Amino acid sequence: MLKYVYQPTEPLEKKMNYESNVALNWERFKRKFDIYIEAFYEGNVAESKKIAMFLHVLGDEGYEIYTSFNMKEEDMKQLNYIIDRFDEHFTAKVNITYERYTFFNRNQKENDTYEQYVTVLKNLSNSCRFKDLRHELVKDIFVSGIRDKDAKDILLKTQNLTLEKVLDISRERNIASKHARELNKEEEVNVHYLKKRKERGYNKEERNKCDRSGTTHGYKQCTYMVKKCSNCGSPNYFAKMCKALKKKKTKKKGRQNMVSEVHEESSDSEYVIDIVKTVKKCLK
């Protein structure tokens, strides 16, 4: 007698979709059926019981397809034979050219991880009838379709690649790239910080302009301490930094400004006098 290990809570026929990619859905359904038997039942299940459950969970449309096979009575007692007939039925409807076109042109999308991308390729390859070449082609399309150009160059230069090795190299490259981005980000922050400090005058290596020589140097490192000013004769600074000369220039500039202001005032007074004279002549 068939014995439940767990009570099934979801009808398996809901997993079979006859409207979209039927061939791919059929492959998934077969795997789901095997898992279903193993998960919910214990011990050896009689062949007739497996066939009955298989036809039940296949649904009404699947049963109609089953009755159209016109099998011999002895063949109807073999589940593997029935499954082979369904294989022929569903795969006959597959456009192999289209399925392979979709597979060969599937590149990694922006949000695809490497694991997600290889899973998509494996699923697409199920309906392409690649047979023994399936894993090799999945590996090759993976290499050509990944977004990381540096990782792709490394893979193309590596010999004796397997799909597992391709995934390992890609993951290592992804981790290395992530660490490099983090380091570059830290360097950018440090450069920005130092730049801001320099702009604010807080850089430890910044040197101030000397008020004796007019040059920049370290503290008490002025090489002109023994020089005399050729302008006023005072020691320890050059003529271009002469304080007396600066005072003269300041006074001269002040006098020039005063003269300019007086000249402007005089010009204004003369202009007013001319206007008065003109008015008097008109009144005579």
Image (cartoon, grey):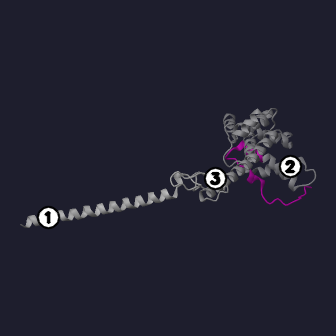
For the point 82% across and 59% down, which residue is it? 8
Considering depth in this image, is 87 or 151 the residue closer to the camera? 151
The N terminus lies in quadrant:
bottom right
In the image, residue 217 lies at what x, y percent?
64, 52
Disc 1 secondary structure class = helix
Residue 281 among those drawn in magenta: no
For the point 74% across and 52% down, which residue is it? 15
Q: Is residue 122 above or below residue 45?
A: above
Q: Of circles 2 and 1, which is in front? A: 1
Q: Is residue 228 left or right of residue 96?
A: left
In the rendered image, which residue does mark 3 sit on? 222
Over which residues does the magenta segment extend? 1-28
Number of marks: 3
Considering depth in this image, is 80 or 102 the residue closer to the camera? 102
For the point 21% across and 62% down, which residue is it? 271
The crowd level at tag 2 (other Cα within 10 Å; few <14, some 14-19, many 20+) is some
Residue 22 among those drawn in magenta: yes
Q: Is residue 222 visible?
A: yes
Q: Amino acid at mark 2?
A: Lys
In the rendered image, which residue does mark 2 sit on? 50
